Amino acid sequence: MPSDEKMDVEEQIKRLNGALRLQNRSVLMYAITAGSVIGLEYQAHAEKMRQHSLAELEDATRLVEKVTALGGKATTNVAPMEFTADPAEALDRLIDCEGETLEALQAAIEPTGREAASEAVEHRLEHMIMRKQEQVDYLLRARRRP
């Protein structure tokens, strides 16, 4: 296989860790939002936010597994975040942060290459992107008004 079609392992680890830093934030932001939203309208979303937090934790674990399998050391860093007691503002922040994480996951596909192991990484990242985008779509619908 030509070298330009092989996985750039060093770059792959770097990009996966970049996405993991943001993914770690996602876990915490969904958990904090689930536990802190107030008001009848937003209480209806609390359980969904808790479920999202658990899904984010699963994906964070998968990123750690992949970094480790490639011979790297998974980051324990968490991207900066701020708490807000305003539920509408919390959803807006989640939407913005998740957009940033989606971009990082997408960028992590580039160095995967065309080997079988590469295709597996790419496919996993695509599934994470799809699931996360569905969550963002949920948040966008939750913020809309008739």
Image: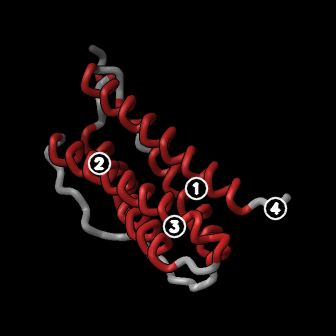
Q: Are marks 3 and 4 in contact (CB under 8 Å)?
A: no
Q: Amino acid at mark 1?
A: Gly
In this rendering, the answer to whether 111 lies above or below 61 is: above
Between circles 2 and 4, the one closer to the viewer is 4
Q: CA distance from mark 2 to mark 3?
A: 26 Å
Precedes in sequence: disc 2 or disc 3:
3
In this rendering, the answer to whether 11 lies above or below 76 is: above
Number of other residues with Cα within 10 Å of mark 3, as a class: few under 14, some 14 to 19, many 20 or more: many
Precedes in sequence: disc 3 or disc 1:
3
Q: Secondary structure at mark 1?
A: helix
- Residue receiving disc 3: 46
- Residue receiving disc 4: 145
Q: Are marks 3 and 1 in contact (CB under 8 Å)?
A: no
- Residue receiving disc 1: 99
Precedes in sequence: disc 1 or disc 2:
2
In this rendering, the answer to whether 122 lies above or below 80 is: above
Q: Amino acid at mark 2?
A: Leu
